[in-house]
Amino acid sequence: MDKIAALIPARWASSRFPGKPVVPIAGKPMIQWVYERTKLATSISDVLVATDDERILHAVKKFGGTAVMTPSALPSGTDRVAYVAKDLDVDAVINVQGDEPLIDPKAIDVLAQTLLADSSTRMATLARKITETSELNDPNIVKVVVDNNNYALYFSRAVVPYARDVEKNAWLLHFPYYDHIGIYAYRKEFLLELTELPISMLEQAEKLEQLRVLENGYKIKIGYVDAQPICVDVPEDVIRVERRIQELGIQ
């Protein structure tokens, strides 16, 4: 049976919300919510936080979690995850975003199953069917186009595909559009290989790391979920999350 570790990259610096991993949400630091929700996934053998800041390290240890310090010079969360993963005795790694305190454990399990269903799959991620026209024009909602075998063809902040000869307000009636959920699963060897590749042109243009994979000729398998996570990007998002916690009755 394949052994999978979930790694949560968490850094202090953020242009819009510095220190957000330790911001209190319903009485607990955000990183604790992410950690504990991830631990509920049945496919995961271990959960670790990969951080570059002693304050986050202390917060994780305080609630009994496991955290590993990484160099602050690492350019991305993916590099932070790879730095920790290289020394782990695992077959695969799931990169769980540290700013999604209500991450669905079942979504993590779907992602793990998507990666492991075929031994040739080296990387996988998730998508959700878009149901509102307003989402199509939001550049913060990344769209993914998928082929007949459920592999990603392209990711974009723009509306893709462009439904020619159809009124824009009716596009959802004529074509399935998918919202990319930013959680990734990798075979360990592929993750380490990926971080050695230079930043690609498409990645720079769209500011989407996953395009480096496609631009270098590799494939990304897509799994499907219904839930849309709430990302904490700015302080106002904390209120949204706390309201959702009350609605769901989560302890």
Image (cartoon, helix red, strand yellow):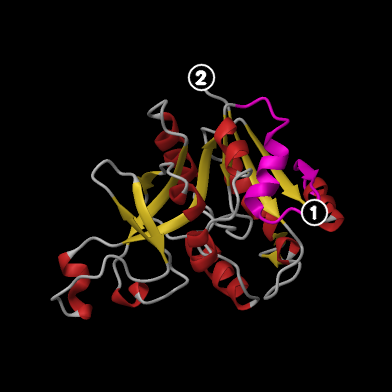
Q: Residue at x 74, y 70 (%)?
A: 18
Which segment did they paint magenta? 63-90
Residue 82 is inside the magenta segment: yes
Quarter placement of the C terminus? bottom right
- Lateral position of residue 32 relative to residue 68, left or right: left
* For discs 2 and 1, the disc positioned in front in the rendered view: 1
Q: Can residue 234 be seen in this view?
A: yes
Secondary element type, mark 2: loop
Q: Is residue 239 above or below residue 28?
A: below
Secondary element type, mark 1: loop
Please state the horizontal and vertical placement of residue 125, each as a whole percent of the image: 45, 47
Q: How crowded is mark 2: few (under 14 residues within 10 Å), some or many (20 or more)?
A: few
Q: Which of marks 2 and 1 is nearer the N terminus?
A: 2
Closest to the observer: 74 or 179? Answer: 74
Residue 34 is inside the magenta segment: no
Q: Which residue lies furthest to the left in this view?
A: 165
Residue 1: image tag? 2
Closest to the observer: 223 or 245? Answer: 223
Please state the horizontal and vertical placement of residue 116, each as a whole percent of the image: 44, 30
Q: How many marks?
A: 2
